[in-house]
Amino acid sequence: MPAIFPERNDFYPSPSTVDGVVEFLRSRKKAEGGFSASPKLPATIEDTYCALKVVHFLENLKSNVANFGSFKRGPTKFLIRCIDEGIVKGPKNLYQVLWCVEFCEFEKSLLQKVPIADKFLTGASLEAFYYLTKTREILPLKCVANLGVPEIPVKDFLASGTLEERWKALYICFASGCLENRSQFDEIVEWVLQCQNSDGGFGFLPGTTSYIENCHFALNILRILNSALPSWRRKAVKQFAIACRTRSGGFSRRPDAAPFMDSTYHAMAVLSDF
C-alpha cells in the first residue's frame, strides 16, 4: 500500500538550526547505537525512531551540511537486540522498528525476525489500528495477511477526538477508502483552525494549551484534506515551533521547557512544512 502522501522535500531551516539539531542528535546517541530522550536515559525504540525521522528531514536539505551516515549505521545493533530480546511490543513499536530497518537499509532478512502475530492486537485501540495501517505500507501483503482489523469506531473520532485522534482516524479512513461523506472535510478544517491559539501553536482541542505535537497533527490533517493555513496562521505556527528550540539544539513541547527527542521530531516536521 503506498503512503497516503509523500514527505515534503522543501525543508529550509537556518544553518544554525541544522547545526544545533545535529549536535542534539549526537548528544542523545548511545554506545549501543540507539537514541534516548535525554543524555542520562537509556535508548528506546521510540526515541531511535524519532531521531531517524529527524535525520530523514535533514537529508532532504538542498545542501550537504553534515554527514548523516553514522546516524543511520549506528542503530543496527540496537534494533537487532530489541528484536532478539522481545522488546518490540505492540503495533507502534512494530511499525517504528520496521520503518527504521527500511530507512537505514538494513539486511532485509532482519524483518523475518520481527514477531508479527496476533499479540500486536492486544488492547486494540485507535493508535493500534493507525500503526497497523502504516505497517501495511512497509511489509509485503503476505506478511500482514493475518493482522486483523480492530473493531473500534474510527469515524467517531472524526467528530469528537483530539487533534491527534482526528489525524489518526483520517489516515485510517483514507487508507481504507471508507470516507463516503466528504462534506465533513470543511467542518474538520474549521475545527482545526479553532484549535490554533494566539501564540501560534495548537491545542489538543479548541481553547486548550499549545504543544508542538498538536501543531504537527494539525498540519497533517490540513495536508491530507488538501487545505492550507492562511499565510498569517502559517507564520504564527512556524514562530511557535522556533520558540520551542532550546540551547541544546533540540526542541521542547512548549517554549521554555526541556527538549526531548519526540518533541524535536514534531518540531522538525512542522518546520519542514514551510
Image (cartoon, grey):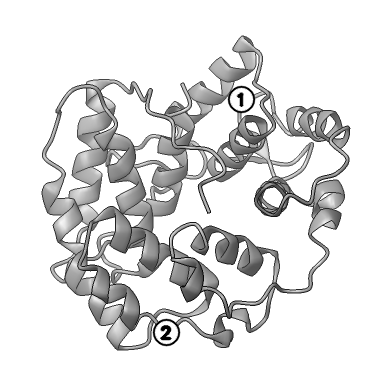
**Position of 69 compared to 14: left or right?**
left
- Viewer-closest of 135 and 97: 135
88 or 105: which is nearer to us? 105
Name the foreground residue: 62 vs 66: 62
Picture residue at 14% right of the left edge, 28% below the top: 64
Disc 1 residue type (three-letter):
Gly
The residue indicated by pointer 1 is 200
Rate crowding at label 1 as few (under 14), some (14 to 19) or many (20 or more) other CA atoms within 10 Å. many
- For residue 115, the mark is 2
Name the spot of residue 259 as percent of width and height, x first: 38, 48
Say which element carries label 2: loop
**In this picture, residue 38 sits left or right of residue 154:** left
Q: Quadrant of residue 191?
A: top right
Mark 2: few/some/many CA within 10 Å (<14, 14-19, 20+):
some
Residue sitting at x 88%, y 40%:
181
Q: Position of residue 255 (x, y in %)?
A: 49, 36
Which residue is situated farthest in the front direction here? 142
